[in-house]
Image: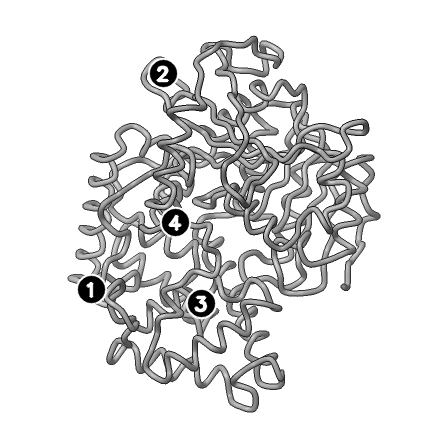
Amino acid sequence: MAVTRKYAGWIAASTGTLVTALAVPALADPEQSDRRTPVSAIAWHACADTDFRNMQCGSIQVPVDWSRPSAGSLTLALVRRPADDTAHRKGTLLLNDGAGGSSIEQLRLAMRIGLPDFAGAMTKQFDVVAVDPRGVGHSTPLVCGEQPKPAGVSHFPRTRAAYDKLVANNRAFADDCLRRNGRLTAHVDLTSSARDFEAVRAGLGERQLNWYGIHYSTLLGRTYAELYPGRLRTMVLDTALDDTGSPRARVVQEAATAEKAFNRFADWCATSEKCVLKGEDVAAEYDALITRADRAPIRTGGVAHQPLTGEDIREATQDYLTLAGTTWPELAKAIVAARDGDATAFTLDPDNTLDPVQVQVPACLDNARPVRTFAGLARLQKELARVSPHLGGAVRSYKAVAGCLGWPLPAKPVTAGAPVHGAPPALVLQSTHQALARHRAGAVMAAQLPGSVVLSREGDDYSMFLASECVQAATNRYLTTRALPAPGTICTD
């Protein structure tokens, strides 16, 4: 929970000095905006954080429960980088990561690698605003004392007793979250977050927003567009997800996608000078490590984490497969270190903008429950083992399924698949090979947003704007002119 502790001071300072309760007129049309609650103003001040030098930090109050707006509020935190070329400013571009990811911390990482130097029109002509969603990061966070999966609890139970232990732990975790966070625990779903962004739009004084969503935030952007037609000028959706099929099928598809990414990593690693396992059978070494760790958990070199089982290592692997140029070499090093007796690297999430609690709780609200019994979970595990022999299906969506067994709050997933009227034609960025989402998911998302185009990038990365000049050029052209690339365009850099 170090991430949550890090955010606590920021929240205390911002809520004390930044929030005002001034009501301002809602800008949306009556039929498009929730007018039961006055919109809170956003109070801005110069950010004290050196990573956000010359930027503005702010916050806004929104209801915990939009159906009962007078029953308590929470704080959303924002960081705004004003457009460099104010004379040719096009508007506000919202950055959002979603599902437990801090957009503010994503902006920090982007700034550290020189975002303004390569962003082009994105930072020249747009105010870039990062908003942490409800329950996440610098906004009012979900803080739970229990861990989603402590040592001794398995997401892959082999016996009825182990299954019952998992369900009991999930219930205890949920009960603890409810005690600590109250009604917020039941209202960190996609629809509630989308309503928050309409309040942000009104607070910013913008008639329309521009949306840049990564991974889960592609679903949030689509949900916002459906709830508030006409309120988005452009939508850039990076690594779109497909939530149109059955929940069970989505788990199997993600497991197969991650397994293909692992196989590509193993093939690269066996021949690359950048891989410490060059010349070895990488997949066999990984499998042997998993078997060994399941037999005798491997130490982590400190007291912060218990020794890791093979299941723990498998569950940590998917996020190491998302950026070929950076995390693949680190995965190889992690395998070697664990083979030598130190599994610490598998306790470090390569995406340090995520908090496991703030990922798990929304997952139990946004995803229907495809499994409710030990027999059903056993059948799903068998199918996952077939399509994912190395990773065993230990992917994000499966962890959500297992972690939500016995969850006391009902799921309230959005309905997906139908065309969204009033949404702008979107630019969907999708890698041809990716550990988090299959390439086909981009086309499925584009079909829901009429007129949208998928820009493919040959490769294995997500967050492609950071890595590809071709993607940067197409994205900036779209943001400034709303012109989309020709269907079937593929970036190869």
Alpha-carbon span between mark 4 and mark 3? 16 Å
Q: What element carries label 1?
A: loop
Label whose residue precedes the other's in the sequence (1 or 4): 1
Which element carries disc 2, helix, strand or loop? loop
Please state which amino acid type lies under the numbered disc 2. Answer: Arg
Q: How far apart are marks 1 and 4 (CA)?
A: 21 Å
Between the C-alphas of marks 2 and 4, the distance is: 28 Å
| Label 2 vs 4, first from the N-terminus | 2
| Furthest residue in direction bottom, as rendered | 279
Image position, residue 447 (x, y; %): 68, 41
For marks 4 and 3, the one nearer the N-term is 3
- In the depicted structure, whether residue 367 falls above or below residue 22: below
Q: Residues under labels 3 and 1: Cα distance?
A: 20 Å
Mark 3 crowdedness (10 Å alpha carbons): few <14, some 14-19, many ≥20 = many
Residue annotated with mark 4: 355
Q: Give the labeled residue for mark 2.
A: 68
Compute the Cα span from label 2 to label 1. 40 Å
Label 3 sits on residue = 317
The amino acid type found where label 4 is placed reads: Asp
Residue picked out by circle 1: 152
Are dots 4 and 3 in contact, CB under 8 Å?
Answer: no
Q: In this view, does 130 lie above or below 475?
A: above
Q: Which residue is drawn at 47% across and 48% down?
A: 246
In which quadrant of the rendered view does residue 481 lie? Answer: top right
Q: What secondary structure is marked by label 3? A: helix
